[in-house]
Image (cartoon, rainbow, N blue to C red):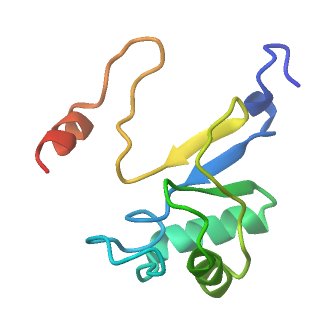
Amino acid sequence: MSSTGDPRAQGAGWIAVDLDGTLAHYDHYRGDDHVGAPVEAMVKRVRRWRQEGRDVRLFTARKPHPAIRRWMKEHLGEVLPITNVKDHHMQAIYDDRAVQVRRNTGETHPDHEQQVWEK
């Protein structure tokens, strides 16, 4: 662990990746057993991280339905751990709904803020 006590400082943390709209195409809810087509750029990124030995977890509000596990096996080549809980070891969240806030300031990127309210 680093001198700051933050395990992320030495790369010991994990990366959270959202499913719907980030890793898989999403346009509307179609049932628990439906997972959209892969978003290839994100699938390639996750596969690269896994090849590098990075800890990547599916971060989703969905229940861990068997269809999600099948989708990951087919498109990622493995089944990632599924969670909806973040902790102090999480390094980053990749999510189509996230708005980045600059640490300890409350400031957001203007483009992100506008994106939220234009939907």
Please identify the quadrant where the N terminus is shown: top right
- In the figure, is residue 103 to the left or right of 50? left
Q: Position of residue 107 (x, y in %)?
A: 32, 19
- Residue at the extreme bottom of the image, as rendered: 74
- Residue 81 figure quarter: bottom right
Q: Position of residue 40 (x, y in %)?
A: 47, 77
- In the figure, is residue 27 to the left or right of 62? left
Task: Please tell me which residue lies in front, 93 or 28.
Answer: 28
- Residue 36 figure quarter: bottom left
- Residue at the extreme left of the image, as rendered: 118
- In the figure, is residue 38 to the left or right of 65? left
User: Can you say whether 27 is above or below 115 in the image?
Assistant: below
- In the figure, is residue 65 to the left or right of 61? right
Q: Position of residue 27 (x, y in %)?
A: 26, 72
The residue positioned 19% from the left and 44% from the top of the image is 115
The residue positioned 65% from the left and 38% from the top of the image is 91
- Residue at the extreme right of the image, as rendered: 1
User: Can you say whether 10 is above or below 80 in the image?
Assistant: above
Q: How many marks?
A: 0
Q: Position of residue 51 (x, y in %)?
A: 77, 69
- Residue 101 figure quarter: top left
The residue positioned 55% from the left and 62% from the top of the image is 63
The residue positioned 71% from the left and 66% from the top of the image is 80
